[in-house]
Image: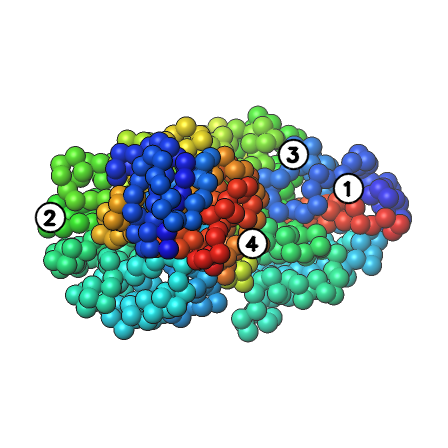
């Protein structure tokens, strides 16, 4: 089955492309990109007015299956992913049981295969049960299909374990993704330590709790020469450490979340548990530094840390609510509105952050529309304005602070392996992407 | 109706008249929501309420037929009793629920507990809870008026109001006074309510405690912070002490109670640095020999027991004014 996307703005920084072009998809791969491609029997879609990009990859999500299917399942998670413009997600191992063995990884991949839609890349645990005591069977995790290891939800407990994990996972070409946080400094903290937490009487998590651990990890990546990736980096001190590491050639990369780019700890007023996440919303100077990190290249990726929680779990006292918010369906509109239209970054840089760089860091397919690549395509309607309606979310959970936000920039369609997996019914002209075949 | 009517009904001479005004808030979640006019109205109303408490028959019918639930998720003697006395003096029907005797121990959530109480149609819920923001949560799910009787480390608005009432009784004003607040600032809800109230009313506020117990960013409240207690109390009109909890030593906040008293305790010598007519306050319960020397606590400038007495009048004013919108026809 062939599909020809005609006359869209093709943005593919991996090939240095940003201009009007056609994209020809043949089966599961990109056949050609160029001006005025002949249809040659392909179904032709008028993509004029749309932006055609390599598929977006969310390298940090929690799909909750197995074990917490009341929050999310792999099926609902990937449905939310494609509706949010993500053709692939990498899921963290803090399920129940923890994904610390090949059997769990195989289960996740089996469920993902049944669900179809987005590609799912499991991330295995660094340590058995993510307990921080003994390495998980990282080689077997790799063989079963894991693309990285992480004890996300908690930091890799000790410097020695981190050193060994870097060396060991490095053998298999996998990065160690670390949730950087000094447990003793975090203590019982629930919000960023600063004026707003003080005023609200919330226990603080100091910026240094993160930056200290990032310094440790950069130093250990330098020692081992193995790749470390800093998850959900949130404070300027951490960014300084990453920047300094990169400057001296240390193999360190990092991601930031949309919520840390658009919200600050001022949002805590009112105690909405949907602004409780870890790392917490930081102060304005940190948010500004993260945006600067996007523009100067020191931030490598935008990842959502999609963390579904049931409404009952969030409808409790702020102290007792679990950390985390969903993000798959709001990330792209937030990024387009608050980063691109706000003038901080251009579309090519956004595509790098959401596609090319995550593909490179995880070593997975996609990240480019170069001929021969997997036909994973995200189509954007950059000027379509919509109000976030959480009741329409595909995720099983609704824990987001962005309900009711009006955002300019939307996902028009999502194509995975040449199959149109999502068409936004609200975007005029987008229904052309949804042919009879392949639309689900 | 006005408070004068009920005062007359009590049969004694007319009380001090209260301006016909109402609060800008439906609930008392914190001082943060109150304007200076709200605070003045509450304090003025409390003056009339205090008069009620001085009568032979200490009861007015203002809240007759109204139900007030005192929902306490933390042990409290002083605050709960004070609210209960205030409610009874206003003729409300009161219901006391302590967490240890409720279904909370069976795993029921705060929201469910509140909704069950709501089904019995109380008019007001007075909530004490260990988590900051618990009153905000309750106010979002309840129709009843919510009064914050202390939420975590956030606010304790009626304490700040009774403190302000007591200061005003002694000094005749709040604006321009130097007030030193000393002790465990970090964990204190009394501190936060007092900072908001006193700065809003124009006082010159100093806070003091070991650096480990000073909330980050506290200067943004418009106050000055120092670890040197002498600097804070020098020339003060008011010294307000905050309780030191023994378990704080576990968090490495200070090494020992003995050292705490030596370096940060309010001794008679330190109290003498303040103005000659300084008043010394403490929200209780006190740790004698830790944050405050016994001779200071019991000394002539101590108004600690007056604070307790004034608490009833201030809480009557809060209950009365918040009920204002729902007591048509009483």
Q: Which residue is mark 2?
A: A225
- Answer whether labels 3 and 4 touch (C-beta < 8 Å): no
The disc label shown at residue B35, or none:
3
| Rendered view: A290 above or below B298 | above
Q: Would you say A299 lies left or right of B103 here?
A: left
Chain to which the residue tagged by mark 2 belongs: A
Q: Which residue is mark 1?
A: B48
Classed neighbour count for the residue bearing mark 4: other residues with Cα under 10 Å, few (<14), some (14–19), many (≥20): few
Question: On the same chain: label 4 and label 2?
Answer: yes
User: Measuring 45% from the left and 68% from the top, which residue is drawn there?
Assistant: A69
Question: Which residue is at a point 72% across and 36% down the rendered structure image?
Answer: B41
Foreground mark, 1 or 3, reads 3
Q: CA distance from mark 4 to mark 2?
A: 46 Å
Name the residue at 82% across, 59% down: B65
Mark 1 crowd level (few <14, some 14–19, many ≥20, 10 Å Cα): many
Does residue B258 appear in the picture of this structure? Answer: no
Please report, as a chain letter, where disc 1 is located: B
According to the image, label 4 marks what residue? A392
Q: Which of these two is toward me, B326 or A306?
A: A306
User: Is A6 left or right of A253, judged from the image as shown?
Assistant: right
Residue A195: quadrant of the picture? top left
Quote the CA–CA distance across marks 3 and 4.
40 Å
**Do callouts 1 and 3 point to residues on the same chain?**
yes
| Chain identifier of the residue bearing label 4 in the image | A
Given contact means CB atoms under 8 Å apart, are the residues at marks 1 and 3 in contact?
Answer: no
Res A16 visible: yes
């Amino acid at each position: 089955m062939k599909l020809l996307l005609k006359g869209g703005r093709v943005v593919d920084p991996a090939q240095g492309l940003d201009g009007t072009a056609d994209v020809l998809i043949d089966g599961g791969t990109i056949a050609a990109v160029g001006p005025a491609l002949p249809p040659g029997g392909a179904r032709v879609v008028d993509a004029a007015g749309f932006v055609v990009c390599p598929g977006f990859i969310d390298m940090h999500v929690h799909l909750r299956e197995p074990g917490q299917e009341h929050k999310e399942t792999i099926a609902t998670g990937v449905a939310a992913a494609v509706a949010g413009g993500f053709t692939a997600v990498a899921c963290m191992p803090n399920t129940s049981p923890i994904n610390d063995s090949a059997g769990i990884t195989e289960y996740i991949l089996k469920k993902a295969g049944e669900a179809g839609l987005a590609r799912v890349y499991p991330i295995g645990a660094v340590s058995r049960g993510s307990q921080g005591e003994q390495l998980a069977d990282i080689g077997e995790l790799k063989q079963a299909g894991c693309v990285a290891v992480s004890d996300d939800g908690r930091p890799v407990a000790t410097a020695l374990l981190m050193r060994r994990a870097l060396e060991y996972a490095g053998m298999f070409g996998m990065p160690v993704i670390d949730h950087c946080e000094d447990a003793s400094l975090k203590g019982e903290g629930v919000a960023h330590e600063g004026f707003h937490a003080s005023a609200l009487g919330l226990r603080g998590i100091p910026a240094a709790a993160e930056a200290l651990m990032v310094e440790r990890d950069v130093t250990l990546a330098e020692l081992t020469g193995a790749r470390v990736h800093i998850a959900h980096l949130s404070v300027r001190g951490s960014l300084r450490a990453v920047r300094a590491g990169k400057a001296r050639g240390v193999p360190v990369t990092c991601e930031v979340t949309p919520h840390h780019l658009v919200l600050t700890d001022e949002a805590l007023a009112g105690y909405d548990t949907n602004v409780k996440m870890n790392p917490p919303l930081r102060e304005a100077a940190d948010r500004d530094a993260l945006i600067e990190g996007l523009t100067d290249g020191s931030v490598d990726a935008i990842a959502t840390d999609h963390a579904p929680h049931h409404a009952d779990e969030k409808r409790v006292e702020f102290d007792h609510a679990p950390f985390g918010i969903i993000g798959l369906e709001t990330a792209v509109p937030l990024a387009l509105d608050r980063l691109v239209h706000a003038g901080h970054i251009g579309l090519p840089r956004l595509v790098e952050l959401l596609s090319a760089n995550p593909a490179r860091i995880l070593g997975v397919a996609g990240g480019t529309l170069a001929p021969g690549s997997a036909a994973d395509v995200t189509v954007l309607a950059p000027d379509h304005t919509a109000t976030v309606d959480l009741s329409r979310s595909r995720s099983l959970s609704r824990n987001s602070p962005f309900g009711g936000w009006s955002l300019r920039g939307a996902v028009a369609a999502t194509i995975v392996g040449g199959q149109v997996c999502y068409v936004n019914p609200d975007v005029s002209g987008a229904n052309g992407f949804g042919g009879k075949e392949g639309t689900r | 109706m006005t408070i004068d009517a009920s005062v007359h009904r009590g049969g004694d001479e007319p009380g001090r008249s209260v301006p016909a005004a109402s609060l800008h808030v439906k609930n008392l979640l914190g001082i943060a929501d109150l304007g200076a006019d709200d605070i003045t109205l509450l304090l003025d109303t409390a003056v009339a309420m205090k008069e009620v408490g001085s009568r032979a028959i200490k009861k007015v019918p203002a809240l007759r037929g109204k139900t007030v639930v005192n929902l306490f998720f933390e042990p409290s003697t002083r605050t709960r009793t004070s609210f209960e006395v205030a409610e009874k003096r206003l003729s409300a029907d009161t219901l006391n629920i302590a967490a240890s005797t409720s279904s909370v121990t069976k795993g029921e959530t705060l929201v469910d507990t509140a909704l069950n109480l709501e089904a019995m149609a109380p008019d007001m819920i007075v909530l004490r809870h260990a988590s900051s923001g618990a009153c905000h949560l309750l106010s979002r799910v309840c129709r009843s008026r919510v009064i914050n009787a202390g939420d975590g480390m956030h606010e304790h608005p009626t304490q700040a109001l009774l403190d302000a009432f007591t200061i005003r009784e002694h000094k005749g004003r709040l604006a321009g006074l130097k007030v030193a607040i000393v002790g465990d600032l970090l964990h204190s809800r009394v501190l936060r309510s007092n900072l908001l109230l006193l700065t809003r009313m124009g006082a010159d506020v100093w806070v003091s405690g070991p650096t480990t117990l000073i909330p980050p960013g506290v200067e943004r409240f418009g106050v000055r912070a120092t670890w040197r207690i002498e600097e804070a109390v020098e020339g003060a009109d008011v010294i307000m002490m905050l309780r030191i909890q023994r378990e704080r030593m576990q968090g490495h906040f200070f090494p020992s109670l003995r050292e705490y008293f030596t370096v940060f305790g309010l001794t008679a010598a330190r109290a003498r640095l303040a103005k000659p007519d300084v008043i010394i306050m403490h929200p209780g319960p006190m740790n004698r020999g830790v944050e405050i020397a016994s001779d200071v606590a019991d000394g002539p400038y101590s108004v600690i027991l007056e604070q307790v007495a004034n608490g009833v009048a201030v809480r009557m004013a809060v209950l009365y004014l918040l009920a204002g919108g729902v007591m048509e026809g009483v």
